[in-house]
Amino acid sequence: MARQRLMTMQEEVAQARHSQGERVAIVAGLRTPFVRRDTGFKSSYALDLGIMVTNELLSRMAIDRQQVEQLVFGQVIQHPDIPNPAREIALALNMSYLQAYTLSCSCLSGIQAVVNVAGSILSGGIAVGIAGGTDSISNAAFSISPRVVHKWREIFNASTLNEKYRLFRQFSWRDLKPHGINLKDYMTQLSVAEISEQMAQQFHISREAQDEYARHSYQKMLDAWKIGLIKEDVMQSFPRPYVDFVVSDSLIPAATRENYYSRFSPVVKKDYATVTEANMPKPVDGAAAVLLMSENRAKSLGLTPLGYIRSYAITGNEIWQNMFMGAAAATGLALDRAKVTLDEMDFIDIHETSASQMLVNLDLFRSKEFAKNQLNRTACLGEIDLSKLNHLGGSIAFGNPRAATSLRLLIQSLNALKRKGGGLSLIASSGLGGLGAAMVLESE
């Protein structure tokens, strides 16, 4: 009986609805511009970006900050001196009373932060919380191997200069070289490019198809900026050293032209390779945050939410083949829990880990074999209407600040629904480690 009650509660949480019918409202969302490494945010740590966007989000809302009860931030590229940036954000904003913690969940860290705050609201633990994500590739920490650390200890502990010198001569130049952040999957030691290449080869995705997909992503993003559809998602930023404003994402107009892509060589040095830096997202710096409330609290404060969480799913899948199929796998669960179909979505925003990953996932959505073998479904998820897919551009164009990426999807999708006058949207992401996330959003 107790197990049955637990399963019922878990299903209610996954459907993002309290047992009394109350929903989790996403009241507001905001992000910084996403800018290329070593440019506009080169002097700002991920913590600085997190403080900046959270402060701006709260400054735009007519609520007492004391109402906020929880702060959860995602971060993928972690700094050893700042193990819990969420807590540091709370302290910097004079909100020391907040429960604040940081999580890391690959490119779906932002969605996971939202899910955690939503879970706290649905359980009755809090009524108001902030979920965010922040990452800085420009200020990623360097490290040296444990072998080198142990060798230095031996040198310092040696009793004679001759012994110290003998030990020091055992070093190679490679030992003394600092190591940058490792953005590979730990278990397989495969990079995003290598995994994307693996999927491209298995599903026979050509270089031309990938380049064309990337070009469309850039074209949609640039068009959206030109007509002002992205502006309300993004705050004007004034980062350290407080000299220049950063007001927009890093734009690459040349990427809308076909001849732009021919100049790039494949990342994997093989004759058959097809994945290049041009048909993958570039690493960028950025942060995002969203304000969540119980539906009743939002109404009592006279706030009109951007939308509500209808359902969500976080999944894991095989890592040795098709590691980035998580978006399709999680979508099946999220749609089932929301009791809706893919055709009912007004917008579909999926994180573009790479062009090949997206083209493979499009195949998986319409594959009966994938539905049967991986999702235990009798029918495929459905054919994605490309006019609904990443209609304002995707991660290939915007760049990938990892922990903030899935929050860009959420903010962008909800603002699009608001402009439309309401409806349903799906956001989804795959990630390293064979992780997947999907969320069905509704707006009125």
Image (tube, rainbow, N blue to C red):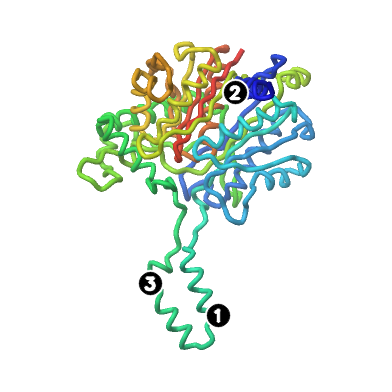
Residue plotted at (43% across, 29% down): 394
Q: Nearer the viewer, mark 3 or mark 2?
A: 2
Q: Which residue is mark 1?
A: 157
Single out the residue that lies furthest toward the front. Answer: 1
Name the residue that disc number 3 marks: 172
Asked where in the image residue 385 lies, by quadrant, the reply is top left
Q: Which mark is residue 14?
A: 2
Please, what is the three-letter code of the amino acid marked with disc 3?
Ser
User: Are there few (<14), some (14-19), or many (20+) residues within 10 Å of tag 2?
Assistant: many
Checking the image for residue 41, the label placed there is: none
Location of residue 180 with respect to 363 vertically, above or below = below
Mark before the other along the chain sequence, 3 or 2: 2
Question: Which quarter of the figure is the N terminus placed in?
Answer: top right
Q: Amino acid at mark 2?
A: Ala
Left/right placement of residue 417 relative to residue 97 reads: left
Q: Amino acid at mark 1?
A: Asn
Q: Tell me how far mark 3 sits from mark 2, CA to CA.
A: 53 Å
